[in-house]
Image (cartoon, helix red, strand yellow):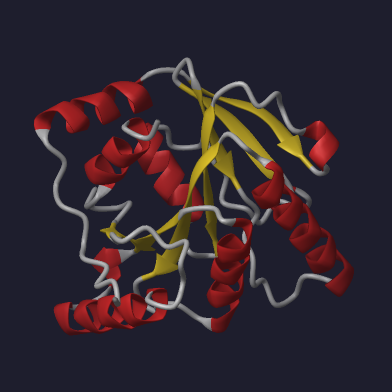
């Protein structure tokens, strides 16, 4: 049976408030990790955010947390190669994975990043969901598909979050959603709902907060 991957519904009042409270609570940078040995203790639920370079990941994380500069737009040398850990409330981690698909990155850097990502995804028992960000203007590209396949193999549930929804018209929006739904049908680890967001306009932010807050 082929999953249809509908758009996520608006959260109910309970889930919306739970999401609001979680992201209004303490959110602090813990550390940037460059090797598995540097990961913090796996003592709390964590969610991770992944996406191509320039997909708007930093802007989305900042919008979710209501903090303008929590996640830096990563043209800072070195920072893009780290797994960045943030506390989220009292019992969760928000994990910002390095942007992928950056054409100018040296081959050795890409290989090291891929190895670290693979080890992290396969070995982190407290990881509840990976949110894979996809630019509404471009849809799922081959470099995204590689990451989705890696998540399939690691048996990590992932959910696609479409970003920059305010940058396209309705026709392009519908086209991209259809393309993403078709692409996801071949990925067994895909969670069967898509979240549409705009960091600038606030679209989908409450929905994504609620999803993160209600994961157990």
- Percent of width and height locating residue 162: 35, 64
Residue 115 versus residue 129 in the image, above or below: below
Q: 155 or 101, which is in the foreground? A: 155
Q: Is residue 79 left or right of residue 166?
A: right
Q: Is residue 169 left or right of residue 147?
A: left
- Percent of width and height locating residue 130: 50, 50
Q: 76 or 17, which is in the foreground? A: 17
Residue positioned most to the left: 13
Residue positioned most to the right: 108
- Percent of width and height locating residue 90: 47, 15
Which residue is pictured at 59% across the width and 77% down the height?
143
- Percent of width and height locating residue 150: 63, 65
Residue 189 versus residue 172 in the image, above or below: above
Determine the image quadrant of residue 25: top left
Residue 5 versus residue 198 in the image, above or below: below
Which residue is pictured at 26% across the width and 81% down the height?
178
Which residue is pictured at 19% across the width and 32% down the height?
16
């Amino acid at each position: 049976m082929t999953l249809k991957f509908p758009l996520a519904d608006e959260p109910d009042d309970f889930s919306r408030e739970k999401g609001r409270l979680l992201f209004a609570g303490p959110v602090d940078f813990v550390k940037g990790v460059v090797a598995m040995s540097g990961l913090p203790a796996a003592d709390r639920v964590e969610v991770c955010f992944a996406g191509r370079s320039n997909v708007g990941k930093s802007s989305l994380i900042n919008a979710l947390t209501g903090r303008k500069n929590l996640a830096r737009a990563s043209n800072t040398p070195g920072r893009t190669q780290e797994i960045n850990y943030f506390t989220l409330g009292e019992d969760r981690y928000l994990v910002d994975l390095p942007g992928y698909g950056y054409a100018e990155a040296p081959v050795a850097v890409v290989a090291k990043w891929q190895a670290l990502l693979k080890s992290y995804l396969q070995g982190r028992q407290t990881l509840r969901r990976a949110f894979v960000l996809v630019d509404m203007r471009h849809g799922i590209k081959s470099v995204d598909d590689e990451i989705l396949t890696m998540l399939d193999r690691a048996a990590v549930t992932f959910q696609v979050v479409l970003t920059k929804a305010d940058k396209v018209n309705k026709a392009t929006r519908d086209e991209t959603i259809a393309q993403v739904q078709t692409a996801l049908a071949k990925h067994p680890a895909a969670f069967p709902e898509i979240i549409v967001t705009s960091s600038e306009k606030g679209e989908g932010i409450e929905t994504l907060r609620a999803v993160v807050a209600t994961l157990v």
